[in-house]
Amino acid sequence: MACEGFVSAQEGQIQGWVWHPYAPEINPTLSVTGADGRKITQIKTSESALSFSPERPAVRYRKFTLPTQDMPYELVHIFAPNGQELAGSPVVVQHKQRSAAFLASYFARNEKEVLGEECLSSKIQPFLPIPVLENTQNVAKVSDHKAPVAIIIPVYRQKALTLACLTSVQKTVQGMGVTVVVVNDASPEVELVQGVKEFCRKNDFIFLSHKRNKGFPASVNTGLKAVKGHDVILLNSDTLVPKGWVIELQNIAYAHNDTGTVTPFSNKGGLVSYPCVKIENPLPPLQALKRLMLAVEAANKGRCADIPTGNGFCLYIRHDCLQQTGYFREDVFAQGYGEENDFCMRAQALGWRHKAALGVYVGHVGGASFGQSRQALMERNEAILEYLHPGYQKKIAAWVKTDPLWQERRRIDLLRLRASKSGTKTTNKTVLMITHAQGGGVEQVVQKRVSVYQTQARRVLILRPIENGCLIEDPLHKKDYPSLRFRLPDELALFKRVLVAEGVQHIEIHHLVGHHACLYGFMRNSGYPYTLYIHDYALFCQRISLLGPEGVYCGEPEPQGCAQCIALAGHHLTQDYTIPEYLARSEYLLQKAQHVYVPSHDTAIRMAKHFAGINYSVRALQNDKNLEKPSKKWSKSPRSQTTPASGALSSPYVQGKPARVRLCLIGAIGHEKGYSVLHQAALNAAMHDLPLEFVIVGHTPNDQLLLNTQRVFITGRYQEAEAVSLIQSFQPDAAFFPSLWPETWCLTLGLAWQAGLQALVFDHGAPAERVRQTGRGWLLNSKLRGSALNQVLIKTVLGCKNSKDGKNPNLFIKL
C-alpha cells in the first residue's frame, strides 16, 4: 500500500497526483488534516482522473484538486491511506490572501498593536512566523569563541549510501570530540534503520527517530534541538567526506567575524559545484573521488570566497548565527529543497555572510531520498522561496552567469591536468591542437588526429575559443576541466606558462575562427613549430565559405571585390580587418608553417590563387578507393514497404504511378550545404506532383519548413557509427549533395559511398573532383534550381535504373 504522490497549494485550491505503484488499479483516498491533527476532509480519487507520464510509461497517476475558499487560514497535511504524508505536504492554504489581510491589518492599526498580543491572538497571523530558538534575546551577534561541533545527518532511504556516508564521517572525526546526531525520519526501509542504529551504537553516534516522516527541514530541527549551543554541520546521508574537512570548515567559519555559514565544493553543490557550476556533475568513482579531494585541498586549502547562499548537502552553521536566525522552516518547505536557502536569506538580512570553503570537496550523489516527486518538489519550493525573498532567483542567476569562483576552479583544473600528465604512459612531448567549437567535419578530423597521436603515445591538448578567451581541453578527460579558460589578451602570459608546464612541443592549427587575434601574434613570437590544416577558406575569405551577399558562390574576386562583399554582407570574424591586413596576416601564418595540408587538389589550386609560393601538401581525409563500391546494377525490384518512415515516405506505387525517386541528403544541411536549393526542389516537386522525394539523414536549421512540403523526411541527429545503416534503411536511389560552396572535402560523400549509393553533386569543389576520379556519380550544373534541377535529378536516376547495364548514362549533366 505504499504511495507515491505530490501536492501543492495554488490560489483557491490544493492540487496534486497520487498512485499505488504496487497496486495501480486502486484509487487512493487521501486524508486532509490541520496542523493540530484534526480531520478537515477527504480527497477521493477516481479512474476518471487517470494520467500518464511520458517519462514513466507504466505509472497510473490519479490527479486531484480540492477547493480551499471555505477552508481556514492554516497549514494542512495530506496523507495517503497508509498514513504516509505526500511530498509537498504540509501546504499553506490561502497564503497570499492571508498575507494581504495581515498587511491591511498592519496599516489600519499602529505597529505596537499589530505586533502585540491582539494580533497574535487573532486569526489573521503574519505569513508563517519565523521559528526562533529559545533565549535569543541574550545572544550576542558575534561570538568571540569557537563552539563545539556537531554533525546532523538526517536519514530516510538508501541503506548502502547512508552507511557509506556514516563510515566516512566516523573515519574523519574519530578522536576529535565531534558529536554526530543521526535522525531517522521514519524510514520505510527496515534494514536501513537496523543497520544505522547498530552503526550508531558501535560508534557513539546519537540516534534519534521520528514516529512519522516529517521531511528534511524537520529532521534538521530535531537534530538542532539535541545539540543546542554547538556549531552544526548539516550533512546529507548520500555524501562522502574527506580527511580534515571539519577543521577546514571551522577555520573558514571563524576567519571572519560575520561569517554565518560555510559550504565546501562538491560535484552536486549548486553554486559551489565542481567541475562545472551549470550542470549536476556525476559522482566520480571512489578512487577518483579520493584523488579529487586531495587535489582540491592542495589547490585551495585555507582559501574562501563569498557566496550568496549556502547549500544544505553540507552546511557549516556557526552557533551564534543559528541562534539569531532560528530554526529551518519545516512548515512551508515540506520534505525539503530550498529550506537552507531561506535560512541563509534570513541570516543575511541580519548581517551574516556565507562563505565557500574552496579547499574542501565533498562527494554527493544527490536526490537519493525523494524519488519521482523530486522535480515537482523543487519547482514548488522554488516558487515559495521566491515569494518569501523576492528577487532571489534573479540574484542567483546573475551570480551563476558571472561565476566568481571560476579562477578557484581553474586552480584545481590546472593541478589535476598536471597530475593526469604524470599518470599516463605518454611521452613528454605534448601536441596542442587549435580548432573552433562548432563541431562538423573539422571536429571529426581533429578527433581522428587525436587518435593517431594516442597510438603514438603522444599527449594531446585541444584549444577552443570561448567568449573573451580560450579553453584548454584534454580529450581523454573532455568534461573534467571546464575552467581551464584564459581571458585574452590579459592572461596570454599565464596561458604561455601553462603550455610550457604541460610540455607542449608542437602545434597543429585546424581553425582560428572565433579565437582572439592575439593568438596570431602568439604563433609569430612563441617559437613553437606548427602545422597548418586547411578545412575551408577562412584564411582569405572573411565569410569563410566563399558565399557572397546573394548567398551563392562569389567567384573569388580580387581584394576590391572582397571588400565590397564584406561591406554588403558582413563577416564571421571576432574583429574587423581590412582585406590587405587580413591577407597579410594569413600569408605570414602560411609561410612560417612547417607543413600546410589541404584535403584536395581543388583546395590547393584555390589557395595558391591567393597565396602563391606556399607548398601545399594534399592529404585526403578519406581513402575513396577503400570505400565500399556500389553494386554494378541498379535494383529494379519494388522498394520494400517496411521502410522506417513508411508514414512519411511514399509507397512503391501510388495510384498506378511508378515509385518516386528517393534521394538522400546526409549531415547538417545548413545554408552553405544547400538548404534553400532543397527547399525549392521540394516545393516544386509537391506543386507539380513530381515523382521525387528527399530523405535527410541528419538535421537542418528549420526542419518544419521542409516537412511542410510533404516531400522531405528528416531523421534528426545521428551517431556516426550508425550513419551507414541508417542511410541504407531508407533504400534511397541515390545521394544528393547540393552544396552552394566549393567544399574542400565533404565527409558525408564518403558515407554515401559506404552505403552503396551513387552521388549527385554540383560541379565545383572537392566533391566534383572525387566524383571525376571515382566515377561514382554525376556532376550537375551548379546553377540548377527548382523545376530545372528536379527534371535533371529524375531523368538521371530513372535513366540509370532503366539502362540495361546499370551504368551511368551521362557522367556530366549540365543544363
Image (spheres, rainbow, N blue to C red):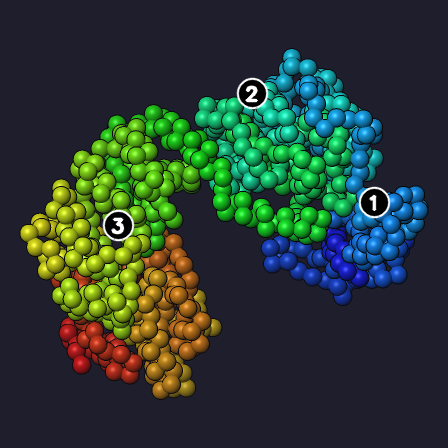
Q: Point out the tag, 3 or 2, that comes first from the N-terminus.
A: 2
> Which residue is the extreme one toward the front?
110
Residue at mark 1 to residue at mark 3: CA–CA distance? 64 Å
Three-letter amino acid code at the position of disc 3: His
Residue in view at x 92 percent, y 43 percent: 117
Three-letter amino acid code at the position of disc 2: Lys
Residue at mark 1 to residue at mark 2: CA–CA distance? 41 Å
Q: Residues within 10 Å of mark 3 (few under 14, many from 20)?
A: many
- Where, quadrant-wise, is the C terminus in this rendering? bottom left
In the figure, is residue 207 to the left or right of 491? right
SS type, badge 3: loop
Residue in view at x 17 percent, y 47 percent: 589
SS type, badge 2: loop
Q: Is residue 245 above or below residue 803?
A: above
Q: Nearer the viewer, residue 161 or 243?
A: 243
| Residue 422 percent location from the top left of the image | 34, 25
Look at mark 3 in the image and give the residue it sits on: 511
Residue in view at x 63 percent, y 34 percent: 353
Look at mark 2 in the image and give the residue it sits on: 243
| Residue 791 percent location from the top left of the image | 26, 82
In the figure, is residue 149 to the left or right of 521? right
In the figure, is residue 320 to the left or right of 297? right
> Which residue is the extreme one toward the left?
613
Look at mark 1 in the image and give the residue it sits on: 83
Q: Is residue 242 above or below residue 348?
A: above
Q: Quadrant of residue 59?
A: bottom right
Question: Do we see residue 86 in this rendering?
Answer: yes
Q: Is residue 544 above or below residue 152?
A: below
Nearest-to-viewer mark from 1 and 3:
3
Q: Point out the tag, 1 or 2, that comes first from the N-terminus.
A: 1
| Residue 183 percent location from the top left of the image | 75, 30
